[in-house]
Amino acid sequence: MSAMGEGARRTWVPGADGSPWGLANLPFGVVRAPGGPPRPAVRVGEHALILDDLARAGRLPVAPDTFAAPVLNPFLALGEPTWRAVRAALGELLRAPRAPGREVSAALVSLADVEPALPVTVGDYVDFYASREHAANLGRLLRPGQPPLLANWRHLPVGYHGRAGTLAVSGAPVRRPSGQLPPARAGDPPGFAPEPRLDFELELGFVTGAGPAGGGPVTVATAARYVFGAVLVNDWSARSIQRWEYQPLGPFLGKSFQTSIGAWVVPLAALDSRRVRGPAQAPAPPPYLRAPEPRGLDIDLEVALMPAGGDAEVVLSRSNARGLYWGVAQLVAHTTVNGATLRAGDLLASGTISGPVRGTEGSLIELTRGGAEPLTLPGGVIRTFLQDGDTVILRGSAGPGVSLGEVRGTVLGSA
Amino acid sequence: MSAMGEGARRTWVPGADGSPWGLANLPFGVVRAPGGPPRPAVRVGEHALILDDLARAGRLPVAPDTFAAPVLNPFLALGEPTWRAVRAALGELLRAPRAPGREVSAALVSLADVEPALPVTVGDYVDFYASREHAANLGRLLRPGQPPLLANWRHLPVGYHGRAGTLAVSGAPVRRPSGQLPPARAGDPPGFAPEPRLDFELELGFVTGAGPAGGGPVTVATAARYVFGAVLVNDWSARSIQRWEYQPLGPFLGKSFQTSIGAWVVPLAALDSRRVRGPAQAPAPPPYLRAPEPRGLDIDLEVALMPAGGDAEVVLSRSNARGLYWGVAQLVAHTTVNGATLRAGDLLASGTISGPVRGTEGSLIELTRGGAEPLTLPGGVIRTFLQDGDTVILRGSAGPGVSLGEVRGTVLGSA
């Protein structure tokens, strides 16, 4: 690696240098040509480099069939030293002015000729509640007049398991779910209808490798070894269904209809320079959650909406993941402190990320104060919750050279 | 099939006729010889019939590689008509006095020579709260002086997602988890220690096939087509960890350290004669949850404990799954009503099954009234919650010809 750092290295792939998809990024995903199988790939500029061809040709430091599966899981199972070695090898293969060789150039396809597929078969999907501002916003809405944070919130990262089987990749539409709605008055029967309060949630997810051989908890000091990379997450939420069902065991159908994730998983190695101190933690968490600084990640986030019937985007919210109270190492340590194992391809998501001021909220229920203050958008468009035909686009950026891409989804009417 | 019914058919497998593992049962599982790979099998008496050998020899109506995987998932993905056809073919191959043929007899191994492995890679594990008596018992303990059932309970089967990656097969020990414990007084910091209130939960689980092609909700009328079979479940629970963490998103580390399931999945087809009317439902649930009767399953259940240091079992509880308020068709319909898909190998569990009287409770927290009334067992042994070295054995029986086997696990001290 040159003394100028990764950002300064150049590639022979046209258009990649100077873009957020140059050699400093190299995110992993899965793409599919029309009629073809899903194939693991690395994104470079507006191209995808198909990894199976390179591995079979002996150009990557892995077994030839590592990328033969339609998902990244076998690669994730190999662990951090291999992840780093493959990243370094890809950097060399892609570096200018080196002539790429026929095998390498043949493995390059234009993103215009493929579509993204789900990059990982997720074993367990855990969704946390790691943004203090988000938890406090919801606490104020749901428990007015009481302390906005529950007693446990500052002591542990509250989390729950979501449905892994309904994860979808960016671009997949989301069908408005139907379900039981809260009774109009206590004692009345519940309603049943398409969800009237369909919402998005802006989140950052972390895709894991397998936990330590032999099991046992992962410490905050070693957690980064077990995290492959970061991906944007939209945890679509049916607020009315959730409100009626969630006591006492937590969210179920209000979330399980779909969760969308980005097509490209950005390796933690590409985010090294974006590590920043996290928010101060008082009271100090228990020792197993005391994470070395810098525990935060400086990733700019935004939520855009393209209202139904139009083709113009409006930005609803801008924030940054550095405000997350609980960092990724703490999420991993907490998940495993009871002896629970990690599998290659688990997904740990932050929960909705909201900032401290107006315009930084990561969901409509927060942006509209529980629906009480509808948003007036350009052209006189009014939104409280999502309408059929609306398109939500979440975006993330870790500086000029490293994009997290987007998670995009359009709302379809109920079946 | 003879007019005498399945129960009267005889097999050439020694010792199987007259046992609860004869031709009327034929449960599916996975076994492993020492040093060998896990292989799908059907249990007959005290033997396992290895299915891969039979499928490759063309003796089963499936593709030759259907049972090549170390789990049942590829078979589960084939759907109910294939499940029935394979069950019928196995019945013929095993039927006396027909000479089995060398291929079939060679596929038979003694259970003494193999050990069970996890029968299924579970995609999503949903745990419900479907026993009214259990929900009411916990309600009385957690919210004394208030109605024992929350407002939503009679309208929908409350449920949440558990951790699929820590499912274990019967026989696997369970390590006592450590974690944050509730503060002694409000405002104090939480403790951190090995869980002092480790408990079992007696449950019945249902292993699914894939949902309907094209997605969409599964109706109560068709739900049985998507359920392969039933298996015993012990949802080990860390009561103190759970009490501190579970607001507002439900159980997480209090459950995720391990859930044990039986080695043998009994096909729904073997339980047909055990269908019984479920408890009356008032108020009537919404139309999508109005299940045709008989919606219940008459399965006798028991919990036995072998206290540490001894080798004598004591039965702690006896009950029956027919008391479950929400039947399996209702659990499937509810899980999918919002559009969520089922994958082959999903697991839907009932939640703790408790009956209406003393001695029918499915957990220690109920048997001991929240720990206030310790159990005095033979030999002067006292138990409030589980101690290291205790062995818990759950058993299920659907009549003399059909056993659900057991789920057995011994508590290991914290790491």
Image (tube, coloured by chain):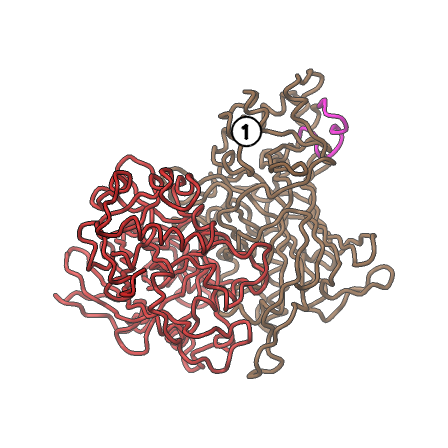
Chain colours: A red, B brown
Could you say which is closer to the camera, residue B183 or residue B194? Answer: B194
| Residue B215 left/right relative to A43 | right
Question: How busy is the neighbourhood of tag 1: few (under 14 within 10 Å), some, or many (20 plus)?
Answer: some
B200 shown above or below B108: below
Based on the picture, tell me whether residue B15 belongs to the magenta stretch: yes
Q: Chain of mark 1?
A: B
Residue B343 rendering spot, x and y as whole percentages = 46, 43
Residue A79 rendering spot, x and y as whole percentages = 47, 53
Could you say which is closer to the camera, residue A370 or residue B256? Answer: B256
A233 shown above or below B207: below
Q: Residue at x 52, y 58 (%)?
A: B154
Q: Is residue A387 visible?
A: no
Where, by quadrant of the figure, is residue B8 drawn?
top right
Residue picked out by circle 1: B84
Q: Amino acid at mark 1?
A: Arg
SS class, disc 1: helix
Q: Residue at x 65, y 20 (%)?
A: B2
A48 shown above or below B45: below
Task: Specify the farthest residue to the right.
Answer: B379
- Main structural element of the magenta stretch: helix, strand or loop? loop
Residue A209 rendering spot, x and y as whole percentages = 47, 54
Q: Is residue A173 visible?
A: yes
Quadrant, the N terminus of chain A = bottom left
| Residue B103 left/right relative to A209 | right
* Range of magenta residues: B11-24
Could you say which is closer to the camera, residue B247 or residue A114? Answer: A114
Q: Residue at x 69, y 15 (%)?
A: B99
